[in-house]
């Protein structure tokens, strides 16, 4: 019988600890498929963040480091500069990347470090129990914005992809979503590009993926997926913001 | 090759290259900028990598990545920069990774001043970051010794898979002295293939982590590290003694360049018929407690001379276990005690005016 669908080699058999309806797992699988398809697993080193995906190394079947909170781009810089033959990727949440680690990602992107960042934007701090993140939407209720995010008090959510796309240094920057099958296909395409640019030693690459956190949003999985489409996508437009071929 | 006249900061930079460290990440801070400036020219010559990072926070975490990749890498900084590296040093130690961090200590706390100090003694030897860990800490007293300890630092870091700190007061970095690189031993090459993250080809993945949510493996990790520290304490204690032959009643304890000032004072006191000895710890962690006790026991009193407000003295007290009176003389704020001051202090203790 012909085998037409299987678990990617770049994933282990371990059952993930993610909540029902959480799309971290979907994003893991897409990364793993791309590593498999581009034949990169044996050269890959992932860098896990501090956040819900801190245990990502239990699920990926490749070398892994576990970073300090927000510092994954610095870890990746050290790895890649030490051994340019590696395929290095960071996997970071929005608190990790856009808040405490804002400086590290900005400067790694600006230096044009040749690694790939998977940036999971779920609009909250998941692991610590649903506090406001730099990406929390205006008016969104979290455990630390009980009356909704007030933009005149704490500012507007940061659009990371747009922000990094303003840098003059060539890079690949895209935003996708995994709340429906169309988004999953687009995410895979973007990640394939991101890792291909690294493989060809072209540039820094980052894919921002809009993701769900039903647990901390306090809604069931199906509704959470819909919430991404209805509330996140309008504020965080999908698409490619920068490609290395195009000078901005 | 003959001896070279070099500034301490440049000699340290060159020593690292001789030790096989071809990757250097740093953020500018006085009084150690000459290291970066030297290496920005020198690294391309030896096929290495010089990278000016966005902050000391980034520096220390980049060193984590480089160490995980299996290469020798290092940084240099000064006090406020070391404070920012504390979190990263805790992580690097927890991950059992080797790295070398030079602290050209300046006056503190706060922004302090750019003149020499030893105010980071406690920060370097007793932690700085969180959790049960130690850096191995070496303190040079001359440019030549700085070069030798730099070479040793990389070997010790690899041997024990633990970060090594060099604590040098700003004087070491700034002064020019003759150095001889030829007499130095060749760096030891350690096999790291069973733990580095260089791609899981024909082997199971390697994982470098510091999170242990389950307390049982968490405690095992800590116990293994504690055992490592016992080994370091047993094998890596280093110190120098001076003028102990005539059984002096007073023994000065001092490290770094200030110990050299003390030697001058001791020579001067000798001409007045006053015998004073010197005990200079070279390894600040592991601290030579037993050796200091053996020396101190034979004296009547000890004097801790520091460019800080009584930090080294805590370890002197630990060594002496209350058996002898321990006096203190220190200057702060970037002031280096002159030999005369130490002579006066000793004379006071001998009741000589
Ligand atoms: C220095 C430091 N500060 C705070 C924390 C606590 N902490 C752990 S995870 C986390 C937030 C993670 O949120 P995010 O990056 O959005 O990822 P998610 O869990 O949503 O996937 C924080 C603040 C920490 N581990 N280290
Ligand atoms: S808390 Fe949120 S981000 Fe974390 S696993 Fe659960 S659903 Fe996913």
Image: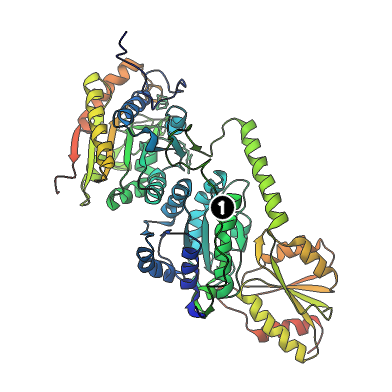
User: Residue, x 70% and y 55% (percent of image)?
Assistant: B233
Mark 1 chain = B
Quadrant containing the C terminus of chain B is bottom right
Residue under label 1: B158
**Quarter of the view holding residue B268:** bottom right
Viewer-side residue, B243 vs A224 = B243
The image position of residue B276, as x and y in percent, is 77, 80
Q: Is residue A127 in sight in this rendering?
A: no
**Which type of secondary structure does the marked residue at label 1 adopt?**
helix
Q: Is residue B162 left or right of residue A109?
A: right
The image position of residue B284, as x and y in percent, is 65, 62
Category of crowding for the residue at label 1, using alpha-carbon neighbours closer than 10 angstroms: few (below 14), some (14–19), many (at least 20): many
Question: Most extreme residue toward the bottom, as rendered?
Answer: B271
Q: Is residue A177 above or below residue B24?
A: above
The image position of residue B117, as x and y in percent, is 57, 71
User: Residue, x 48% and y 31% (percent of image)?
Assistant: B204
The image position of residue B174, as x and y in percent, is 49, 76
User: Residue, x 37% and y 19% (percent of image)?
Assistant: A7
Ligand 1's quadrant is: top left
Q: Is residue B230 in sight in this rendering?
A: yes
């Amino acid at each position: 019988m012909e085998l037409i669908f299987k678990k990617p080699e770049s994933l282990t058999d371990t059952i993930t600890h993610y909540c029902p309806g959480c799309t971290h797992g979907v994003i893991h699988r897409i990364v793993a498929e791309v590593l498999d398809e581009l034949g990169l697993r044996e050269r890959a080193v992932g860098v896990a963040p501090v956040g819900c995906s801190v245990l990502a190394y239990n699920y990926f079947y490749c070398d892994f480091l576990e970073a300090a909170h927000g510092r994954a781009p610095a870890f990746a810089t050290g790895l890649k500069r030490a051994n340019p033959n590696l395929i290095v990727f960071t996997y970071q949440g929005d608190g990790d990347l856009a808040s405490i680690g804002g400086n590290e990602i900005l400067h790694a992107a600006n230096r044009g470090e040749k690694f790939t960042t998977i940036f999971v934007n779920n609009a909250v701090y998941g692991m610590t129990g649903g506090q406001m993140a730099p990406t929390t939407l205006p008016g969104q209720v979290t455990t630390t914005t009980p009356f909704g995010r007030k933009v005149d008090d704490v500012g507007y959510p940061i659009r990371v992809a747009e922000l990094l796309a303003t840098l003059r240094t060539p890079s690949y920057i895209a935003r996708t979503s995994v709340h429906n099958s169309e988004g999953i296909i687009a995410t895979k395409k973007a990640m394939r590009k991101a890792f291909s640019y690294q493989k060809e030693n072209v540039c820094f690459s980052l894919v921002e993926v809009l993701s769900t956190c039903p647990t901390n949003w306090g809604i069931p999985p199906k509704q959470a997926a819909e919430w991404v489409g209805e509330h996140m996508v309008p504020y965080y437009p999908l698409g490619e913001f920068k490609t290395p071929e195009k000078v901005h | 090759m003959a001896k070279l006249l070099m500034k301490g900061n440049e000699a340290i930079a060159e020593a690292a290259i001789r030790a096989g460290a071809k990757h250097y990440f740093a953020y500018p801070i006085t009084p150690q900028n000459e290291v970066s400036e030297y290496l920005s020219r020198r690294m391309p010559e030896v096929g290495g990598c010089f990278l000016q990072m966005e902050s000391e926070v980034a520096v220390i975490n980049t060193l984590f990545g480089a160490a995980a990749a299996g290469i020798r890498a290092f940084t240099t900084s000064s006090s406020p920069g070391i404070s920012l590296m504390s979190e990263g040093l805790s992580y690097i130690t927890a991950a059992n990774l080797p790295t070398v961090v030079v602290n050209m200590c300046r006056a503190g706390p706060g922004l302090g001043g750019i003149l020499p100090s030893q105010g980071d003694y406690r920060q370097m030897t007793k932690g700085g970051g969180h959790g049960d860990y130690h850096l191995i800490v070496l303190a040079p007293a001359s440019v030549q010794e700085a070069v030798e300890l730099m070479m040793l630092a990389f070997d010790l870091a690899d041997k024990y898979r633990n970060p090594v700190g060099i604590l040098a007061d700003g004087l070491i970095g700034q002064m020019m002295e003759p150095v001889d690189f030829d007499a130095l031993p060749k760096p030891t090459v350690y096999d790291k293939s069973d733990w580095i993250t260089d791609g899981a080809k024909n082997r199971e993945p390697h994982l470098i982590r510091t999170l242990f949510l389950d307390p049982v493996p968490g405690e095992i990790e800590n116990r293994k590290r504690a055992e490592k520290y016992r080994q370091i304490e047993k094998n890596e204690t280093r110190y120098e003694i001076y003028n102990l032959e005539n059984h002096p009643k007073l023994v000065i304890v001092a490290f770094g360049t200030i110990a050299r000032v003390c030697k001058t004072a001791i020579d001067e006191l000798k001409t007045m018929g006053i015998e004073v000895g010197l005990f200079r710890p070279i390894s600040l962690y592991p601290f030579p407690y037993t050796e200091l006790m053996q020396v101190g026991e034979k004296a009547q009193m000890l004097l801790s001379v520091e460019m800080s407000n009584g930090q080294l003295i805590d370890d002197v007290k630990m060594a002496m276990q209350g058996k002898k009176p321990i006096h203190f003389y220190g200057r702060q704020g970037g002031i280096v005690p002159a030999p005369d001051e130490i002579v006066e202090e000793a004379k006071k203790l001998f009741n000589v005016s």
